Amino acid sequence: MDDEGLRVEVYRVLAATGRAPDTGALAAATGLTAEAVRAGLDRLAAARHVVLGDAGGIVMAHPFATVPLGFSVMGRETLWWGGCAWDSFALPHLLPAEPEVLVATRCPGCGAALAWVVGRDEPPPGDQVAHFLIPVRRIWDDVVRTCGNQRLFCSEGCVGAWLAATGNERGYVMDLPALWRLARHWYDGRLERGYQRREPVQAAAYFAEAGLRGPFWGL
Ligand SMILES: [Zn+2]
Ligand SMILES: [Zn+2]
């Protein structure tokens, strides 16, 4: 079992259950020793395929998360934590058995409950906006903080209120169609062997095609 096999098993379990497998489950599924699983997870983390917590557990394997970051994603039989607005909107595109999911969150500006049925064919209706705080060249400085600050708001006004309350500088605001296009193909192939990670800093053409503009995206 190579690292790619281990990676695919992590993703298989996250996709099927919404929960990350622990070391024992990965050892049983792969035939590796627990020590070999831990070493493999460390290499996958170094290659940015997974994010490990202090105790070695899987915190994120984008677009999946195992900790609350502001979003839930409900499928027909499975409930996932959404890692962020981008990751939550990506799940119906990645999961063959889930053509539509319910993405729910609260507006960080005013606390209102927000929810959308997100599918594969077109962006969900709504005049809400996404605000991303961290520019793409800095995404991996602290990726959990980055995802935790890629949120959906009622309106530009709520983004402004949140920025004023938190003392943050404005990042990038996009409408729901732009978020949906960003999420649509970003994670293509991630559940299968042979996946090549896209580095955000190298993805200028993808971002431009999604309709994103400016230095925030490296454009
Ligand atoms: Zn609001
Ligand atoms: Zn994210």
Image (cartoon, rainbow, N blue to C red):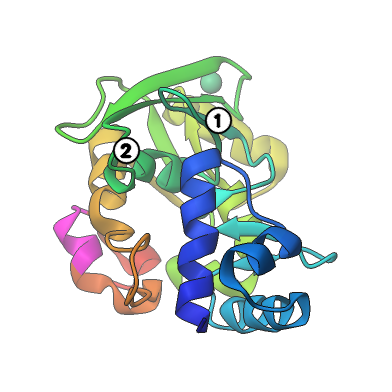
State how far apart marks 1 and 2 are (Cα): 13 Å
Q: Residue at x 75, y 62 (%)?
A: 24
Q: Residue at x 44, y 68 (%)?
A: 136
Task: Specify whether 44 is left or right of 207.
Answer: right
Tell me, for residue 92, which label it has, or none: 2
User: How far from the left and from the top, in percent, is residue 63?
Assistant: 47, 52
**Residue type at the position of mark 1:** Ser
The residue tagged 1 is 72
Give the residues in magenta: 206-211
Task: Specify whether 32 is left or right of 185.
Answer: right
Is disc 2's CB within 8 Å of ligand 2? no
- Residue 122 in the magenta stretch? The answer is no
Q: Is residue 63 above or below residue 24?
A: above
**What predominant SS class does the magenta segment belong to?**
helix
Q: Nearer the viewer, residue 24 or 93?
A: 24
Q: Residues within 10 Å of mark 2 (few under 14, many from 20)?
A: many
Number of marks drawn? 2
